[in-house]
């Protein structure tokens, strides 16, 4: 009886983990190796560029950085990333509110007279995936 319960529990756990995916984000085209790259993952239009679902940072090597988000439920997401050259944990801006540090979004979405839109940056994750973002 113990074997049956153990096998059943393992089967249920494997089904639950099969629903989650890994997302690797490769960032390239950085102008130098100073500071870190901050990567924000968003899971809705309402939170895009306001509140991250998950966030990671990475050291930069050879003007590139890589982060991996584990155990993501299948769904729709968008990425926003910036090069935090002075490692102060925020995207520095000038007096007009314009970013002073490099930034980018998934799908290489660009904003017109402002930040990119969620609809331009969104993508779907259902299996282990990799996203390339170029500054």
Image: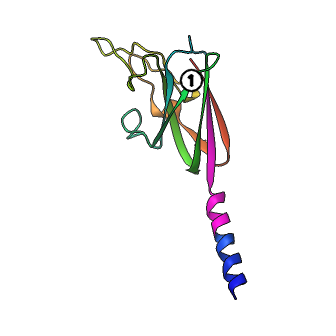
Is residue 10 inside the magenta stretch?
Answer: no
Q: Residue furthest left?
A: 95
Image quarter (top left, top right, bottom left or bottom right) of the N terminus: bottom right
Residue placed at 56% from the left, 25% from the top? 59
- x, y (%) of residue 8? 68, 77
Relative to residue 12, is residue 84 drawn left or right?
left
Q: What's drawn in magenta, residue-wise?
A: 13-27
- x, y (%) of residue 18? 66, 58
Identify whether 81 is placed above or below 41: above
Identify whether 69 is placed above or below 19: above
Q: Secondary structure at mark 1?
A: helix
- Image quadrant assignment for residue 114: top left
- x, y (%) of residue 22? 63, 45
Foreground of the two, 59 or 41: 59
Relative to residue 129, is residue 89 drawn left or right?
left
List the residue tagged with mark 1: 108
């Amino acid at each position: 009886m113990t074997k049956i319960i153990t096998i059943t529990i393992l089967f249920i756990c494997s089904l639950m983990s099969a629903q989650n995916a890994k997302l690797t984000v490769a960032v390239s085209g950085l102008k130098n190796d100073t500071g870190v790259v901050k990567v924000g993952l968003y899971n809705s239009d309402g939170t895009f560029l306001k509140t991250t679902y998950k966030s990671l940072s990475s050291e930069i090597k050879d003007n590139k950085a890589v982060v991996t988000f584990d155990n993501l439920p299948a769904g729709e997401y968008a990425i926003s990333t910036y090069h935090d050259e002075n490692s102060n944990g925020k995207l520095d801006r000038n007096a007009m509110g314009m970013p002073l540090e490099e930034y980018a979004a998934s799908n290489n979405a660009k904003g017109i007279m402002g930040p990119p839109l969620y609809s331009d940056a969104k993508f779907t994750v259902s299996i282990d995936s990799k996203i390339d973002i170029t500054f």
